Image (cartoon, rainbow, N blue to C red):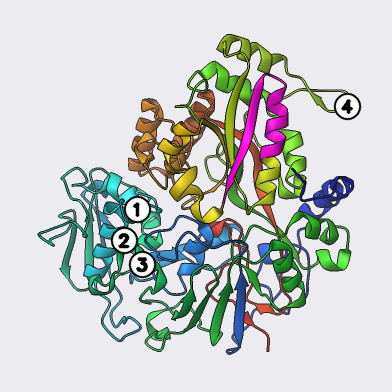
Amino acid sequence: MRRSVPVAAIAAITSAGLLLAGCSGKGSDSGDSKANAATTGIVNASNEKGGTVNYAMSDAPESFDPGNTYYAFIYNFSRLYARPLTTFKPGPGKKGNELVPDLAESMGKATDGGKTWTYKIRKGLQYEDGTKITAQDVKYAVERSNFARDTLSLGPNYFQQFLKDNDGGYKGPYKDKSKAGLKSIETPDDNTIVFHLQKPFAEFDYLVSAPQTAPVPQAKDKGADYTKSVISSGSYKFDSYEEGKQLTLVRNPKWSAKTDPLRKQLPDKIVLKLKVAQSTIDKDLKSGNTHVDLAGRGVDGQTQAQLVTDPQEKANTDNALGQRLVYTAINTKVKPFDNIECRKAVEYAIDKRAVQTSIGGPIRGQIASTVLPTDIDGYQKYDLYPQKYAKGDKLDLTEAKKHWDKCGAGKINTTILARNDRQDEVDGATSVIESLKKIGITAKIQSYPTSKYFSDYAGVPKFNKKNNVGLIMMQWGSDFPTGYGYLQQILNGKAISQSGNTNLSELDDPEINDLLNSAIANTDKAAREKAYAAIDKKAMEQAAIVPITYFKVLMYRSPKATNLVSTSAFSGEYDYLNIGVKK
């Protein structure tokens, strides 16, 4: 497979990347360019209105429906047209983790030991058509996104797991003949919504920051087709949508700054072009024709090689951590990886340095040994499967071969999945294959588009079993910036779903499940973080995940965009809420 970065450029990237990653750069309100400026401040701060902000993406999102998505960039982008109960205040780095009320007028009121949470909806809110936004619409949004999984399967299922009557036979609003909905969500009046949980959930304010709590009027819901014409509760509304080609948003005339302290509604129009080559996006960012790369994955390898060796260009880049991990998931349900000794062999055999180099070097992330990234509270440094290198950077395979012999599988064939519109992921998979050959594992790549990766392929356990998928390339960011928000959907057996699954290892360990459940019920933050570290270590003891790198993104900061700030809350992406354009 062709590398996205010429081999000759990798050494330059690696050394230059270390320099760039160490450049602190102070945020600038005056527009002065410095490397990493948007990780420490808001660059080109402005309240200037007008113009068009242009976004682009190399593929197409799985969905624009706020209740049927699980990518950080759509969580981020959807806030322009869909307001959840709470959200994150735009701010650099960890300051972007500050949770604030959005649709709600204040944070939730917890009673019954944290099993009941009450929110008051702001008064005077309207949809784009002038109808009133109600608490009943928020209830309906949660019901459709969590209990109609045969129709909307792409988002997380937290509410289904934790609401009090989740086992009461409720089949979701599309099949509910009584139309009464969930008993565990009450709406005593148009401005009050009450969630009744099975057990305490100490971080529930974070949970309701998901776009699944953005209101949906039942009369306007079109099920799977709602993605084509979402009814706006935010500052922008859908103007036109050509599937797989382009989405255009325009100002929502019914939005009012009086009821929204976060949004500024700066540009007249927001245009998102889809399925644009990454190299073209990078070129257009530099010229100012494109202002934001929607996916927030950073520039491609060729562009990276140019940026890190040119001081003037480097000044317009941001190299940010984003609470993300690049890893290979080992499928614990597919032979021979249902044997822990086989999985441990893979842990030792994958040459992490080689994979790191293949995906862009240290500028794209430091070598990882834990499930929790370094910038999530609860992270503790340890390494259960240390890698040793001989002269010439040759990986010592003694431990790998020892565990593979214990496994007793001999020479095997397996399949590894990757996203075909993410060249770095394909390159990483290629490097993994080269590593595993040395202990007797022959793997072949099957690659699929981002838009279908979880709905049709990697996230479908039946597909993986049928196609002998033993290994899956993955990059994961936290649902919300806590250990639970990071670990729950990739480690809890209860999170495994038949489509849209993100527990790609299909790990269902009772001890880990119990620890996750008890941790989230604990109101002591320090105790929760201690538990998250313990869960991390137990997952690594099960050898279900091979951590590759603590991901860092290298983004080019368009000189014509205003209010650019890289936020940890959305995986190091720029916060999309108030980006404007210089006229």
Helix, strand or loop for disc 4: loop
Q: Which residue is mark 1?
A: 204
Label 4 sits on what residue type?
A: Gly
Q: Nearer the viewer, residue 297 or 126?
A: 297
x, y (%) of residue 376? Answer: 55, 46
Cβ atoms under marks 2 and 1 closer than 8 Å: yes
* Marks 4/3: CA–CA distance: 55 Å
- The first of marks 3 and 1 along the sequence is 1
Cβ atoms under marks 4 and 3 closer than 8 Å: no
- Mark 3 or mark 1, whichever is nearer to me: 3
Mark carried by residue 163: none
Q: Nearer the viewer, residue 231 or 258?
A: 231
x, y (%) of residue 27? Answer: 70, 69
- Mark 3 or mark 2, whichever is nearer to me: 3
Q: Is residue 395 above or below residue 39?
A: above
Label 2 sits on what residue type?
A: Gly
- The first of marks 4 and 3 along the sequence is 3
